[in-house]
Amino acid sequence: MSRTSIVKVLKSESSPGEIQVKGWVRTKRDSKAFSFIELNDGSCLANLQIVADATLDGYEENIVHLTTGASVAVTGNVVESQGKGQRWEMQATAIEVLGTADEDFPLQKKGHSMEFLRSIAHLRPRSNLFGAVFRVRSRMALAIHQFFQDQGFVYVHTPIITASDCEGAGEMFRVVTMNGDEIKLGDDEFFGKPSYLTVSGQLEGETFACALSDIYTFGPTFRAENSHTSRHASEFWMIEPEMAFCDLERDMDMAEAMVKYLVSDALENCADDLAFFGKFVDKGLIERLEFVRDRPFARVSYTEAVELLTASGQGFEYPVEYGHNLQSEHERYLTETQFKCPITVYNYPADIKPFYMRKNDDGKTVAAMDVLVPGIGEIVGGSQREERVDVLRANLEEHGLSEEDYDWYVDLRRFGTVPHAGFGLGFERLLMFVTGVQNIRDVIPFPRTPGSADF
RNA sequence: UCCUCUGUAGCUCAGCGGUAGAGCGGGUGGCUGUUAACCACUAGGUCGUUGGUUCGAAUCCAACCGGAGGAGCCA
């Protein structure tokens, strides 16, 4: 008999009759003549209640000794439950114990701290919370592909090992080869020159946009910053669309549409898991997601943002000053207090942005944009790219960069240049936003952060 | 890298200078179809590590290690 998933059983309109389910015991309650086993196989948040009669083969020897964490295969009839709290339950006719769980199995029915669960990353997917997080993660990955593919975008795999520095994107991990304990550098370098793990696929993405028009990347990204915050990881996933024949306005429209699409998809397809987050993680979650789905984002220029912050009369720890980056506290004030919704800030001073962003006609600002959301801050960062070869060359020089290192990038402007724009969306930050989970380490299966690469 | 907090049983925590505690989880027994079931009994700990102060340290001090929060940087 083949295995039926528990989600399928619980969503049945009529009884599927005699079937087999397999999964892990969440808890067991014993009575004199029978036991209730809560079985979970990860296919959904809910457990299937198994009624195990004392007359079953192996009841005294095995079944009554089952503890939380044990794995079993259960054959039985799906019947309407006599008790409250669930529609269907399974009257077992045979239970095979696949694996017992030692008495120190760390997961219990009671609440655990996120820090503790992080320390048992190999077992935490078996908890309600992490099962839900990773089902939502999977769904959001699918939704990202759907969003772009439905609009004719081409999925491009940009390299993970790269010799080019997407300047301004952060510190990099060096890729080296080893001869025993000896690291080979210089002339012995495997690629003939220094190479790194990618911090962004943008520059390579631009080359494909300047051929296939609308493209996106979706893959792992690495940053070597020694950041100790709930929003940073050394390895994370990023989505980077790049669109030819596109200006900043449409770039902002796309970013907003994408965030709304993903939120809407989660509300529709992950309702049970989101309801769980709404109950145990973040009481206002569902309401906030519906708000984000239904209302337009606020849109303000950097100059307006600085004026709003200055006029707010708030005593910020860091003063608001034109020409400086907005601090975390400033971003939070704008999105959480001033607008109470996601906002897109655009047209930043050129001095604080990288060389590839398109210079505006005022000569002082560039066509950059960030989407800020309540509770997390920056979730999207993007820009229109500088397509004018002379301006790009001047920017390279201003930033102290050598054209030789970027010759292929400059070539895009020499051979049929087009206006184009794109952005990067941090996948984990999106997941934090959609699930309400407060720490980036809890939306990645096995988080890598400074000083920690366990599992 | 900087600032702050924190480390006691499998888990959540109490104890804060005088013999190491509770709840949950585990074991044993009981029990009306239970829902974080319930009742009784029971096993379980080099109090992060090292050093110091003291008659005596989980408790006070120092260093180190781990964890968390915030800042900067960024997605």
Image: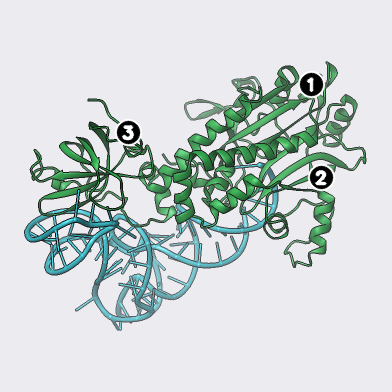
Chain colours: A green, B cyan
Amino acid under disc 2: Tyr
Residue, x 72% and y 64% (percent of image)? A317
Name the residue type under label 1. Answer: Asp
User: A298 or A216, which is in the foreground?
Assistant: A298
Distance of label 2 from label 1 (alpha carbons) = 26 Å
Same chain for marks 2 and 1?
Answer: yes
Give the Cα distance between marks 1 and 3.
Answer: 54 Å
Q: Earlier in the sequence, mark 2 or mark 1?
A: 2
SS state under label 3: loop
Q: Position of residue A347 (x, y in %)?
A: 82, 43
Q: Is residue A402 above or below residue A347?
A: above
Q: Which residue is painted at 63% across and 22% down in the image?
A: A156
Q: Position of residue A147 (x, y in %)?
A: 61, 30
Q: Which residue is mark 3?
A: A5
**Is label 1 in a helix, a strand or a loop?**
helix
Mark 3 belongs to which subunit? A
Labels 3 and 2: the sequence-earlier one: 3
Badge 2 is on which residue? A348
Hey, which quadrant is residue A355 in on the image? top right
Q: Residue at x 48, y 41 (%)?
A: A270
Q: Chain of mark 2?
A: A
**Same subunit under labels 3 and 2?**
yes
Image quadrant where one finds the N terminus of chain A: top left
